[in-house]
Image (cartoon, rainbow, N blue to C red):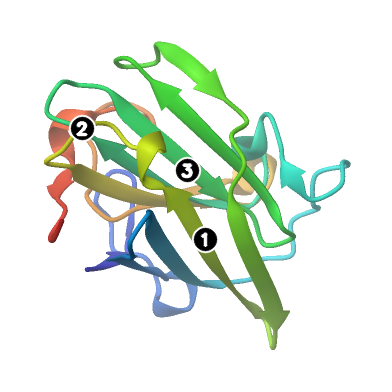
Amino acid sequence: MRLLVAHTWDGVAAPADEQVTLALSWDDDALCIDVSAPLHGDPPPAVPPGPTPGLWEHEVVELFAVGQDGRYTEVELGPYGHHLVLRLDGVRQLRDQLHPLELAVERRDGRWSARARLAIPLLPPGPLRVNAYAIHGEGAQRRYLCHTPLPGPRPDFHQPDRFTALLGR
């Protein structure tokens, strides 16, 4: 399944040079997430690559996957090898975080790509619905993009009722 992050959070079309693609696939024990995104050059987190609290405050691509019981997993990937995996029992009800994630990142020619493998036990029971996001920029220039636009007066990615059915598995 391919997800194109091609709109601002509220549904305005994003320019082609700002769009992000996520390709999702299954292997025997993981959900594979392949990202292709423009590199905006935001400063990386001031910690070594790996599990990073607060990664959403940096340049990041995110995938949310919700199960039929309302629990969901949030996966955040950064262009410098930082990541964050959170599991939630409901909207903003953090269950646990900082799970390990297999992640390979490459930066080249103004773009970055990543391949992540999320262990199936970190996902909620299916069937799953998903949404994908990209965040970049600083201060007043901060941009919030998404696959499926979201209603509201400000960006709020925690709207699992707006997610798209995940094909397969």
**Which label number is shown at residue 116?**
1
- The answer to which image quadrant residue 3 occupies is bottom left
Residue at image position (13%, 61%) is 168
Q: Is residue 60 visible?
A: yes
Q: Position of residue 22 (x, y in %)?
A: 38, 67
Q: Nearer the viewer, residue 8 or 134?
A: 134
Q: Is residue 151 above or below residue 61?
A: above
Where residue 125 is drawn, which disc sits there?
Answer: 2
Residue drawn at x 22%, y 68% is 1
Percent x, y of residue 166? 16, 53
For marks 2 and 3, give the CA distance: 16 Å
- Mark 1, secondary structure of its residue: strand
> Which of the 4 quarters of the picture holds residue 33?
bottom left
Q: Give the mark nearer the N terminus: 1 vs 2.
A: 1
Secondary element at image label 2 = loop
Which corner quadrant of the image does residue 12 belong to? bottom left
x, y percent for residue 7: 31, 58
Q: Residue at x 61, y 60 (%)?
A: 103
The numbered mark at residue 75 is 3
Q: Is residue 157 visible?
A: no
